[in-house]
Image (cartoon, rainbow, N blue to C red):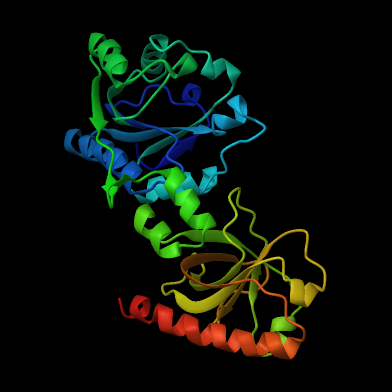
Amino acid sequence: MNRPTTVASLDEVGPLGSSLHLAIGMFDGVHLGHQAVIDAARQSARRTWGVSGVLTFDPHPSRLFHPEDPTLLLMPVHMKASFLHYQGIDLVINQRFDAAFAAFEAEAFPVMLKEKLPDLASIYIGENFRFGKGRKGDVTELIRVCTQMGIHVFSIERLKQNGEPVSSTRIRNELLAARMENVNRLLGYTYRSEGVVQKGQRLGRKIGFPTLNLLWEPELKPCFGVYAVRAKGPNDDNWLPGVANYGVRPTVMQTRAKQPLLEVHLFDTPQQDVGDDLYVEWFHFIRPEHTFATLEELKLQITKDKNRARELLEPVDKS
């Protein structure tokens, strides 16, 4: 393949002209455990001059099986694809997970993969991987069927941190508890928001703390509050340190806003303005979102938050 490619289904792939080395999984968040599986596929493709691929699913299977209580994702589909390509993956397949796809019997699933992906040479999965109707298929079954078709299967042992498996569920719990240091440690990179700068009320500018505002709507919303962050545009070389509030702004709005907003105040003058793309990295939680009696009280607190953010980000800026 000449350049990284993302497709919406297995039907769009076809012959590749080179051997395909495919990692399979939901890979929500693409955390350290996921990266071990994905990197194994990438390394095999590199050694054989083949194509590295990832087969992932949209929506999360819980949307089909438990629509009343679906799993809320850490990362939107488009961001996951971009991240995978950044890691060196050539082909990302965002296969729709619907009733028809879920109905494949376990034994038929790898056969279907080979039919859709004629260049499939090897499959990479986590050791707890399940597949097929009723999740009846496991690693042993996958190896049995794939061996008959000449496809190699590699099962990667679950990565552990402090004796517990690194998992998307564990990261979701840490994010909801605003333990950003743990979130970033388990992800293996810094948790990030991406969005377009929105026009605001410019109240921050009036009280001396201008902000870049993102109407950012993740499925899994972090704890409302104030965070030490860095931000930059997609074409900027350097990250600028700052402090951000994520929430419904009860002091400013008097009544809570219907949609949470990410308001980023940078310590240096940013190049971005309304309509520009902005990336925000979250490093530390400073405090929960509060209601203040006056704007003067809010201004004093923001000054404290800004000073605290500078302290927390100092090791990051020096790295």
The answer to which quarter of the image holds residue 146 is top left
Image quarter hosting the C terminus: bottom left
What is the quadrant of residue 310 in the picture?
bottom left
Please provide percent x and percent y for residue 133.
48, 14
Residue drawn at point x = 75 percent, y = 71 percent: 250
Residue 160 seen: yes
Q: Quadrant of the N terminus?
A: top left
Above or below, 264 relative to 172: below
Q: Position of residue 217 (x, y in %)?
A: 64, 54
Residue 35 found in image quarter? top left
Q: Nearer the viewer, residue 43 or 217?
A: 217
Furthest residue in direction front, as rendered:
163
Left or right relative to 263: residue 128: left
Residue 212 placed where, x, y %? 63, 74
Q: Which residue occupies 55% across, 59% down? A: 194
Q: Residue furthest right?
A: 255
Write the residue at 47% across / 78% down. Answer: 241
Residue 102 percent coordinates (x, y):
53, 18
Up/down of 10 relative to 126, above or below:
above
Who's the residue at 42% across and 18% down the image?
116
Q: Nearer the viewer, residue 30 or 91?
A: 30
- Residue 62 position (above or below residue 83): above
The reply, left or right, for residue 302 in relation to residue 156 is right
